Amino acid sequence: MLEDDINGISHLIKKELSSSDKILKPDFNQKTGRELLVFYLQSKFKQVLAYDAKAEEPIFIDVRYDFIQKFSRRLIQNPAKRIMIGITGESASGKSTICKEIQNVITKFNMPVTILTTDNYFNDISELIKEYGTFDNLRDNGYDVDSPNSFQLDVLKEDLDKISNGEDIYSPEYLLNGTGVSVPKAKFVPSNKIIVVEGMASMFGENKDIFDIKVYVETDIELRKQRFLTRAYTERNQDLENAKKHWEYILGAGEKYVKPYRNDADIIINGDTNLAYFSQILEYIHTITNNFT
């Protein structure tokens, strides 16, 4: 049962914290120290995967065969660079919900993590919306809102380059009020040790190459449809007919523009995961990566 999985992870956390079998915190400035840390983390991450594989509702659907080795080399060879994590998936797959849960854990443990959403990099289409009257009319007349061409990918790449090298940035802010307005350099984004970038545009173009960890969120199509229609009605004030029409659009756009990046993912996770269990997994990962003598 799911409750057993949650309790099981809670037990592992307590066991880890109370264990006397801990390693001395390595000197990360020395290559040998980083190599020791990497070996330790590899074994612990494999434990997480093994435990999750037995869960009633596993989080990890698939993990790329060479991911652990590839990421380990990166930590050893370039320890100063920010750890860049890209999260993508089709609309209503659960990307934002998962990132909110990550944010909750970040707040709880005061971890040095930044979350950046690529939805703020939509092009400013305010003049087009004025011309066509509404966003729905603009879409119905052929505007492909989820196309890579509909994002400020050059600005996103510049911002990702800066933040990955330790420079704070100001990202655009796309207003979700139907006006299509994008305000340049509106949101302060600090460059913390770990940068999580979520949204379909995170993998577009050359941007995918900057990430140390590429995550794809996958969710059952009927659940995605239910989530999308509910969100359209309750949060975006769309009538049901327009919401259904837009769902048909994003279904095709997701297949065309987002789903191909599933093949590039290091980790594929379940977008319908139980958030309490997901939170416990995150807490366990935090514990094993910070529990030294």
Image (spheres, rainbow, N blue to C red):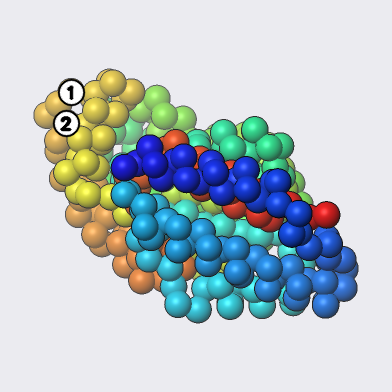
* Residue that numbered label 1 is attached to: 239
211 is higher (above) or lower (below) than 76: above
131 is higher (above) or lower (below) than 254: above
What residue is drawn where x is 40% and y is 33%? 180
* Percent position of residue 101, x then y: 50, 37
Element carrying mark 1 = loop
Along the horizontal axis of the image, is 111 left or right of 87?
right
When asked about the image quadrant of residue 173, the answer is top right
- Observer-nearest residue: 222 or 126? 222
* Percent position of residue 241, x then y: 12, 29
* Percent position of residue 262, x then y: 35, 65
- Observer-nearest residue: 11 or 142? 11
- Observer-nearest residue: 113 or 64? 64
Residue at the left extreme of this rendering = 241
* Residue that numbered label 2 is attached to: 242
> What count of labels does the image hold?
2
Along the horizontal axis of the image, is 258 left or right of 26?
left
43 is higher (above) or lower (below) than 19: below
* Percent position of residue 197, x then y: 54, 51
Asked if one can make out residue 277 in the rendered structure from this viewpoint, the answer is: no
Q: Which mark is residue 41?
A: none
Give the Cα distance between marks 1 and 2.
6 Å
What residue is drawn where x is 16% and y is 31%? 242
Element carrying mark 2 = helix
When asked about the image quadrant of residue 274, the answer is top left
Residue type at the position of mark 2 = Asn
Say which quadrant the C terminus sits in.
bottom right
Say which quadrant the N terminus sits in.
top left
- The answer to the question of whether label 1 and label 2 lie on touching residues, with beta carbons closer than 8 A, is yes
Residue type at the position of mark 1 = Asp
What residue is drawn where x is 82% and y is 71%? 33
What residue is drawn where x is 32% and y is 54%? 218
